[in-house]
Amino acid sequence: QQQVKQSPQSLIVQKGGIPIINCAYENTAFDYFPWYQQFPGKGPALLIAIRPDVSEKKEGRFTISFNKSAKQFSLHIMDSQPGDSATYFCAARGGNKLTFGTGTQLKVEL
Amino acid sequence: GAVVSQHPSRVICKSGTSVKIECRSLDFQATTMFWYRQFPKQSLMLMATSNEGSKATYEQGVEKDKFLINHASLTLSTLTVTSAHPEDSSFYICSASSPGLAGGLNEQFFGPGTRLTVL
């Protein structure tokens, strides 16, 4: 019940494309859903986050869509660039603990 | 703001020795610090949660006698890997949070990680 399922495991898009990463959860007690970007050998950095009472949030080129009834949320990256190539993790917070998804390795090709 | 540092960034040690990793919140007071472990191409797994001045709370399956956590001040937590073995080789990441940060969202801010290699 504490798992967060993330897909796809890896993703390749062309520059300017819109990669979409999906996550699903079971625990309805989760109250906060952040997305993190991680480059090799670095710690994760917060990209954008959403609360379950909001269906969509946009910050710059990053958009989270949230479907509370389906217990699913997704990250869209608009106008993707080679510099966006990284591993992306969704997460869900219950209490003060974060449960991370399994990660998506994104590669943006020229 | 909300910067978290870790030291060292990488460490190599011999099997059987102990290694200490420091995690510092540089520009805020962290009421809670978290330690994660990440194996190559895998996700972050929470090892323990610590509050300043209290004993750490370990996740199921994490040996508290092997991974000693001390949160002596509001800006410093340490993780000591005792009697390290090659299977302890991993990327260790800390994070810190404070209820007053990020508009009260109690966001976790992550350090850059420490790569531990045990020979």
Image (cartoon, grey):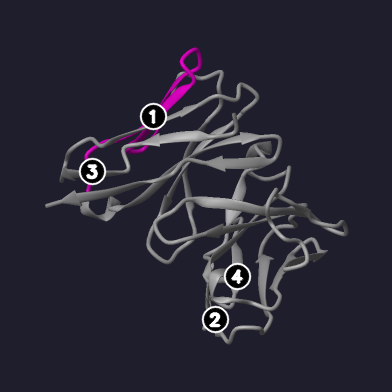
The answer to whether marks 4 and 2 sit on the same chain is yes
Q: Residues within 10 Å of mark 1 (few under 14, many from 20)?
A: some
The amino acid on which the numbered mark 1 sits, given as a three-letter code, is Ser
Q: Quadrant of residue A56?
A: top left
Number of other residues with Cα within 10 Å of mark 3, as a class: few under 14, some 14 to 19, many 20 or more: many
Furthest toward the bottom, the residue is B14
Q: Which residue is mark 2?
A: B11
Q: Chain of mark 4?
A: B
Kindly state the secondary structure of the residue where label 4 is placed: strand
Residue type at mark 4 is Gln
Question: Which residue is at a point 48% across and 54% down the rendered structure image?
Answer: A44
Residue at mark 2 shares a chain with residue at mark 1: no
Which residue position holds label 3? A80
Relative to B78, does residue B44 appear above or below in the rendering?
A: above
Residue under numbered circle 1: A74
Q: Amino acid at mark 2?
A: Val
* Magenta range: A58-81
- At mark 1, the secondary structure is strand
Task: Please tell me which residue is depicted at 71% across the width and 35% down the height of the picture.
Answer: A95
- Whether pointer 2 and pointer 1 mark residues with C-beta atoms closer than 8 Å, the reply is no
